[in-house]
Amino acid sequence: MTNTTETGQRPKRKLFVAGIAGAVAALAAVYVIVSPNGNSIGATSCTQALKTAQNVKPFATGEVAAFLPAQKPLPLSELTFKNPDGTVATMLDFKGKTVLMNLWATWCAPCRKEMPALNDLQADLGSEDFEVVAVNLDRGGLDKPKAFLAEIGVDNLTLYHDGTNKLMTDLRSKARATGLPTTILVGQDGCEIGTMYGPAEWASGEAKKLIEAALKSVSG
């Protein structure tokens, strides 16, 4: 009787142990898949951006209260768009410089409204350490955005553009740029410091303090 019971329990024990081993293996597999593409990059490539995001968080107030400091900064160096002459530009071209990348279009009313403030921000803080990179997403060439910027007197911003929708697609694949305008503060390491969805008064005192905090974080 005893032998029969023990014999009957052995397969169950083996199945139980096998089940635990399988669960551990499955968890390990999930970690291996996720970690190299997420945690690993964030920990090694975007360390400075994470530090800067934490430092600027107290300055996300007033006109830039909706600015979201990155908790897991995304590497953005591979993003591409066009220079005014049609040559390819990448965020890697701005390495060593803090960038406020703004996505806009002439058909976007909030984008049009905030453009003068972005122009003023570039005039006030633009330097070899900081640049407002406003990327126009109009289709059909540059005539319309050029005319609009000339009409409102924007003369401090370079007319970067992307009429292919690739930039938006690439950012959406990273769960960013769900609409226009979208503005991303990018650190010298090419990583996201934080993101703003919707318009802001970028020439305001609060916005400038946020940018200055980011620059100070790098120099400090």
Image (cartoon, helix red, strand yellow):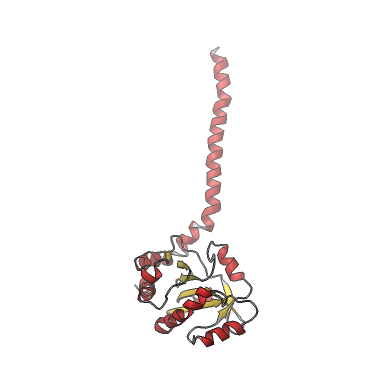
Q: Assign the C terminus to one quadrant of the image.
A: bottom left
Q: Image point 57% across, 86% down: which residue?
A: 147
Quarter of the view holding residue 160: bottom right
- Residue 126 visible in this rendered orientation of the protein: no
- Asked whether 66 or 11 is in front, the reply is 66
Residue 20, position as x, y percentages in the image: 53, 36
Q: Would you say 201 lies left or right of 172 here?
A: left
Q: Nearer the viewer, residue 98 or 64?
A: 64
Answer above or below: position of 61 versus 131. above
Q: Is residue 47 above or below residue 87?
A: above
Against 152, residue 205 (above or below) is above
Q: Residue at x 53, y 61 (%)?
A: 175
* Residue furthest front in the image: 109
Position in image of residue 165 (x %, y %): 62, 71
Front-most of residues 155 and 151: 151
Which quadrant of the rendered structure holds the N terminus? Answer: top right
For the image, the number of numbered tags is 0
Q: Is residue 98 left or right of residue 150?
A: left
In the rendering, at what x and y percent does residue 60 appear? Answer: 38, 67
Most distant residue in the right direction: 140
Residue 57 place in picture, x, y as percent: 37, 65
Residue 33 seen in the current view? yes
Q: Residue furthest top?
A: 1
